[in-house]
Structures are given as C-alpha cells and as structure tokens.
Amino acid sequence: MNPHVLSILLISLGLGTTLTFMSSHWLLAWMGLEINTLAIIPLMAQKHHPRAVEATTKYFLIQATAAAMILFAASSNAWICGQWDINQMSHPITSTITMTALALKIGLAPLHLWLPEVLQGITLTTGMILSTWQKLAPLALIIQTANNTHPFLLTALALCSTLVGGWGGLNQTQLRKILAYSSIAHLGWMILVSQMAPQMTLIALITYIVMTTAAFLMLNNINSTKIITLASAWTKAPTLTALTCLVMLSLGGLPPLTGFMPKWLIIQELANQGLATTATIIALTALLSLYFYLRLTHALTLTLSPQITNATTPWRTPNKQPTLALSLFTIMATCLLPITPTIFILMT
C-alpha cells in the first residue's frame, strides 16, 4: 500500500476514535464511529484475497447495521425526551437498542458470530488493529451509557460473552480465531463492571490491549497463524517462544502475570457489591479460556514439529522486523502485577 494512503488511513483511524472520545452529542459520536469503520476497510482488503474481501464485506455490513441502530436509537431518544446528549439516554427502549448496537459493534456474545470469521480473513497486523484500537470508541460509549442501561442486560451480555469466549476457543486450530474468542471473553469482563466501577473497565481494557498487542506482535514475528506451526517456533526463536508462553498465560489471567490484575480487581468489586454468584460464574468461565491458552503453551514448548506439514517450512532466516514495540508490550504484558496498587490509585 502506498505510504501516503496508509498515513491518511491511520490518521483517520485516530481522528475517528478521538472524535468519539470528545463528543457529548450522539451525531458527533456516530460520525467518529463511521470514520473509524471507513478507515479500516481499505486496510482489511489490501491483500486482494477472496477471504480478505469476504471478511471486509462482513465487517462493513455488521458495522453499518450497528451504526444505523445507534442513529435510530439516538434520534428516537431525541424525539421522545428532547435530548441528543450521550449521558441523557434516559428512555429504556432507546438505551437498550443503543447497548445492543454497541455490543454488535465490538462483538459481544450473542452478537459475536462475525468476529472470528472476520479476524480469520485478514492479516495479523490488521487483526491487531481490529482487536485493540477499534474497541476503544464503542467501549467509551458503553461506559457513558451504562448508567442508563438495565443491569440485567449488562450482566447477561457479560456472562454470555465470557462463556462463549471460553467455550468457542476450545476446539479451534487457527490462532486468529482463538484470539477472537479471547477478545470476546475479555470484553465480557469489561462490560460486567462498566456500571458499578467504570475505572475497573478502563484497567481491564488497558491490560487487554497491552496483552493482545504483545500476542499479535509475537505471532507476526514468528510467522504463525495455526497451532501446528507453533511446534517449530522454538527452533527459530527460543527466547521469543518462552516469552510467548508467558504472554498467553497472562491472557488467561494466571498469577503472577499482568493478566491476573483486572480479573482479581473485578472479582473483588463484585464480591464487595454482594454479587458472589456472578463472581463465581465468571471465575469458572475464565477456566475455559485458560485451557486453550494452556493448549497454545503446550504446542509451543512440549510438542515436536510433525514430519509432514501443510504449512510452509519456516527456515531460520535473519528477522528484520523492528522489535522495540514487541519488547515494550511483552514487558508490560508480563510484569505489571506488582504495581497493581499504583495503577489502581492512578485510575481511581
């Protein structure tokens, strides 16, 4: 892709998200979401492969549907209540439609079916943008509208997402689909406390972005998109393979890694709010996610590469990819748990 075109698209991505962050009016927020969607579509379709075109078409249709629902809910709220303000979504029907549309936009279960298929059809780099940056604007709107939404809807979406995210990733062999189900499960954790403790949602979002970015950068560095190709990764980059295991376990929320921090804080908040049953259910669903992360670490460290494989043989050639971002995100994805009190004080 032409560097100038790429620069314009990336600037548009940042502009769309910033516009949604700064807006208090529904039309401005909607415009930011649309700029975001239109900016990432050329990035998704740049490979000119049938799977990439199919994934781009699916993504566009889903995002257009969600945007139309948001615009309909906002105009209906303005008609009923006379308010275009994001924080004044007071009518129960319009707030429910808005939350459903935002859930569809980020891929919360049971509105998640498009996300694994779309992520499977695009490159790892574009998939990283889709799994991290593209979640920011809709989640900002979810946090702002959560107080006007029925708690049952948020809890149902959260528990369904953590269950589906854990259950759906169990039998996958494609790494991008596994990371898609991982994204669904993590979003469920964020949504659960968005009403009672939005600062916890922010902490969970930041740690999720750090860990997911590290995972995508590592898989891109070792050029793996299937579990079967992970078995030969240790011959090319043994240190990176060991760190990849730690990042995967951190995504699963295993102490003493960074991923344990948001889960610990969210379960503690649920217990303080008297929601022990909800905390127990969501902790049990986290075990499902942890299982398929353990599958990945097993494939990375305890299996040998098969003699016959359909994948291209990854020869041990010098890697010329920049590693500064990979190093920073790997350190943050594994070592932030000891400073949890500092992060919690800064966020609250």
Image (cartoon, helix red, strand yellow):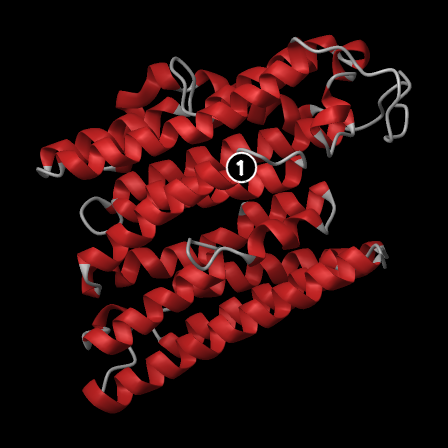
Corner quadrant of residue 114: bottom right
Give the quadrant of the C terminus: top left
Give the quadrant of the N terminus: bottom right
Corner quadrant of residue 57: bottom right
Corner quadrant of residue 215: top right
Q: Nearer the viewer, residue 288 or 104?
A: 288
Q: Determine whether, in the image, residue 12 is placed left or right of residue 3.
A: left
Q: Nearer the viewer, residue 13 or 261?
A: 261
Residue at 67% in and 56% down: 10
Residue at 55% in and 74% down: 64
Q: Position of residue 239 (x, y in %)?
A: 69, 9
Q: Determine whether, in the image, residue 140 is placed left or right of residue 273.
A: right
Name the amino acid type tagged 1: Gly
Q: Residue furthest bottom?
A: 79
Task: Say whether residue 224 is visible.
Answer: yes
Residue of label 1 = 169
Q: Position of residue 335 (x, y in %)?
A: 46, 16
Answer few, some or many: residues within 10 Å of disc 1's Cα (few below 14, many 20 plus, some between 14 and 19): many
